[in-house]
Image (tube, rainbow, N blue to C red):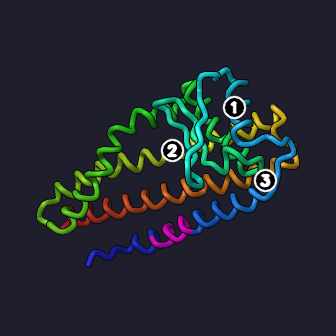
């Protein structure tokens, strides 16, 4: 009933997202088998990079799970999954230093990260309301205002994902440059680091693409109704 020509592209993007998820896990697992020549664990690499940037007050905490690594801007804490925290592999050091990249962005007030933080409260609300409005707008076609409101709220969520892309790529670029400059990795190991970080970045690209295509679909539906 609600099939739309854009659904085909969305399915392709969804397939890309699934592939990206499998790839990031596969790439992480592969390079988790390769020890880093410096012998540093993820924690040691993260701590050394933070200290080198003057971020002595930013703590590092281990968290359960796999690929649960993240930087908490509220408590200013780097949280690393246990495999990353304790192991001294290409994957562990890559992921740990990427999260430190976010902490450095926070310190220097990287514009896209600042924008992302300011957007979060609004997006947190919008992402919860948008699906309800979109569904109601599709079901009750006589109430176009519901669909329009859903599009507005969903647009905020899409914009948030688009802003996230440069934040993630910038954090990875910072990490790679500092890892080489600080002697955390050799030039030969940079290839493995790049593969780990690029695989992770692809998941954000796929998610943003799906959301953008969905937004275009809803806008097209709304415009077709307006033309009737």
The residue to which callout 1 is attached is: 47
In the shown orientation, is residue 215 left or right of residue 30? left
* Foreground: disc 1 or disc 3: 1
The residue to which callout 2 is attached is: 164
Residue lying at the far bottom of the rendered structure:
1
Image coords of residue 150 (percent x, y): 25, 54
Which image quarter holds the C terminus?
A: bottom left
In the shown orientation, is residue 125 left or right of residue 172? left
Read off the magenta span. 11-18
* Alpha carbon distance from label 1 to label 3: 21 Å
Q: Tell me the tag on residue 10.
A: none
Report the magenta stretch's main SS.
Answer: helix
* Alpha carbon distance from label 2 to label 1: 25 Å
**Nearer-N-terminus badge (1/3):** 1
Q: Tell me the tag on residue 192.
A: 3
Looking at the image, is 109 positioned above or below residue 66? above
Looking at the image, is 6 positioned above or below residue 107? below
Asked whether 13 falls inside the magenta stretch, the response is yes
Locate residue 167: give its quadrant: top right
* Foreground: disc 2 or disc 3: 3
Residue toward you, 30 or 160: 30
Q: Residues within 10 Å of mark 3 (few under 14, many from 20)?
A: many
Q: Residue at x 68, y 64 (%)?
A: 26
């Amino acid at each position: 009933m609600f099939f739309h020509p854009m659904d085909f592209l969305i399915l392709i993007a969804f397939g890309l997202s699934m592939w990206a998820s499998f790839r990031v896990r596969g790439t992480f697992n592969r390079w988790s088998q390769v020890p880093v020549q410096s012998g540093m664990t993820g924690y040691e690499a993260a701590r050394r990079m933070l200290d080198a940037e003057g971020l002595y007050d930013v703590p590092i905490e281990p968290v359960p799970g796999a690929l649960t690594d993240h930087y908490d801007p509220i408590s200013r804490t780097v949280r690393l999954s246990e495999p990353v925290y304790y192991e001294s592999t290409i994957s562990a050091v890559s992921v740990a230093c990427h999260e430190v990249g976010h902490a450095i962005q926070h310190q220097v007030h990287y514009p896209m990260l600042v924008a992302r933080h300011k957007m979060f409260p609004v997006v947190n609300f919008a992402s919860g309301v948008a699906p309800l409005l979109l569904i109601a707008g599709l079901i009750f076609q006589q109430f176009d205002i519901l669909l329009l409101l859903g599009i507005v709220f969903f647009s905020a969520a899409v914009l948030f994902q688009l802003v996230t892309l440069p934040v993630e790529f910038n954090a990875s670029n910072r990490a790679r440059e500092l890892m080489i400059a600080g002697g955390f990795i050799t030039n030969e190991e940079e290839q493995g680091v790049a593969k780990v970080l690029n695989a992770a970045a692809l998941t954000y690209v796929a998610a943003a693409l799906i959301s953008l295509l969905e937004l275009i679909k809803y806008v097209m539906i709304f415009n077709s109704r307006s033309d009737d």
